[in-house]
Image (cartoon, rainbow, N blue to C red):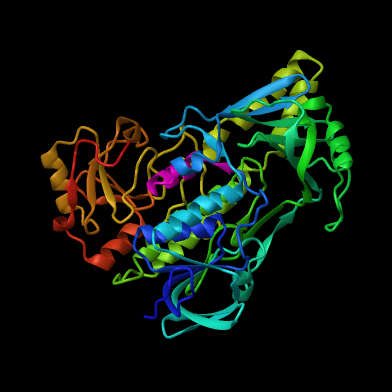
Amino acid sequence: MVRSTRDELVTEVEVLVVGAGPTGLMLGCELRARGVDCLVVERGPDIDPRTRAVMVHAASLERFEALGQREALEARGITQLRIGFHTHGGYWALDFTDQDTPFPYYLNIPQPAVEAVLADAYRDLGGRLVRGVDYQGHREEDGAVLVRLRTGTGDVTVAARWLVGADGSNSTVRQELGLGFDGITYPMSYLLAEGIPLAEPRRDESAMYIGTGGAVSLLPMPDGTVRVAGPVARQLLDRDAALEFDEFQDTVGELGFGATLRLAKPDRLAHYQVHERLADRLRVGRALLVGDAGHLNSPAGGQAMNTGFADAAALAWRLARLTGSGDGDPALLDDYARERRAAAAEVARTTGVLPLLEAMRAASDASDASATADAERAVQDGLAGLADSWSQLYMSYPAPGEDDGTALATAGNRTTHRLRPGARVPRHVPDRDHFTLLLPPDTPAADGAGVAATAGLPPSTVIARQTARQAAFLTEPAPVLVRPDGYVAAVLGPDGGASHRARDLDLAATRTGAGAADTIGLDLSGGVSV
């Protein structure tokens, strides 16, 4: 296999990732952490300086922690504890401080800073990142993907075992695959301004200000600036039309919140439209899609970048089993596509907050006690579990036997979440290279060894105990086999058999011929759960 320095192209690679945004770089880090040979290419010459995505939620912070990059990320961001919703006469808070995570908060951090942290981490892990390279197309041949790339000095063909399109909403990889990208475009312009605020906002809280003519978010940024953005434009603006500062100030001022939403001076002005779209498929042969290349959703709750990070984690462990000396079943990638497409559809559902904003307006404007009570109940129903859903800590994929390709995942919350195949295990630090068998908290060591001996586990399965909190997510005590991405592969019966068996366990066992002697780390003092 031909090799060169890490910032130059190679002619052969295990995984070629097109796109060096947050999702592509996270995938690169996840792959390199598993020792997978990886090349990331990017059309642009450098990181785009524009602040696009901003929020990094708890589930993503756990992924940065596993990569050893959380502290570097937090050093560039600002910690946020809640989202406040303001109307004229009403205030409601969405609190993130009581969740099942070591990091019960979210960060506001400009996307370029996220990309810088990930790019440094990727290179430190031995990854190759080449900018100024344009994807031109690909074809499959003899168990490989031949990818045509255009550089400043000419065209190059790179042979990869797998191709991943992480090249954003206008993905050329998706277009090359001929995949539809159906959905909707919101029929209004969103306005955006960043700069120094006239009135100092709360530094630990992002906010939504809701008036009769629209709503905007106010997001504190780590450098003392704020972002004000939302659907308040009087009309749909021409794509190429310039947004003037006075126009922005006047339009936002019509919401009636005075100096709170005014800037002393803008550093950036923009307008855009919001799309909700979902690719027909996330896998075609040896090519896969991640992040915005496969799905778009409303900016409410700051979900887009976090959903891309979850795509990366879900894909990386599967690709690791299909590269190097691994002989994994490619059907693992069909499960990636099925699960993450369902998750993207569920995220789009949770970010549809217009009914909630209308309920808040109604609660503020109600003229009698009965109407006020009804509107307040509607608000509380809309807020219930929303912080948990946006944190992505309680996601559950539809089980294979329950999914005809149209089923949604469930974003879930701490009250309704249950451990079943496809469910995320809260407060669990997954072993990136191995499955983990979590035994009930009071399992004697001898019994734990017996379960491991009869369960037909994947090789080198790590053995640990559930925490009491994790056990509470089960309807009855049972061992739980957890995948390397932190999701349940199977809930085992008392005899070690899978009472609810997921496809991932079947594929892993088929791939390895796993047996009891392959288990490692019989640590019943708590293991890898936190």
In the rendered image, residue 200, in percent from the top left (x then y), is placed at: 70, 26
Q: For residue 468, what is the image quadrant?
A: top left
Query: What residue is drawn where x is 79% and y is 49%?
Result: 271
Classify 15 as above or below 268.
Answer: below
Q: For residue 202, what is the image quadrant?
A: top right
Residue 482 visible at all:
yes
Q: For residue 316, what is the image quadrant?
A: bottom left
Residue 346 visible at all:
no
> Mainly helix, strand or loop, the magenta region?
helix
Classify 406 as above or below 233.
Answer: below
In the rendered image, residue 402, in percent from the top left (x then y), is placed at: 46, 54
Q: Quadrant of the C terminus?
A: top left
In the rendered image, residue 99, in percent from the top left (x then y), is placed at: 46, 31
Q: Quadrant of the N terminus?
A: bottom left
Query: What residue is drawn where x is 81% and y is 48%?
Result: 189
Which residues, given as a range, are shown in magenta?
55-70
- Lateral position of residue 319 relative to residue 50, left or right: left
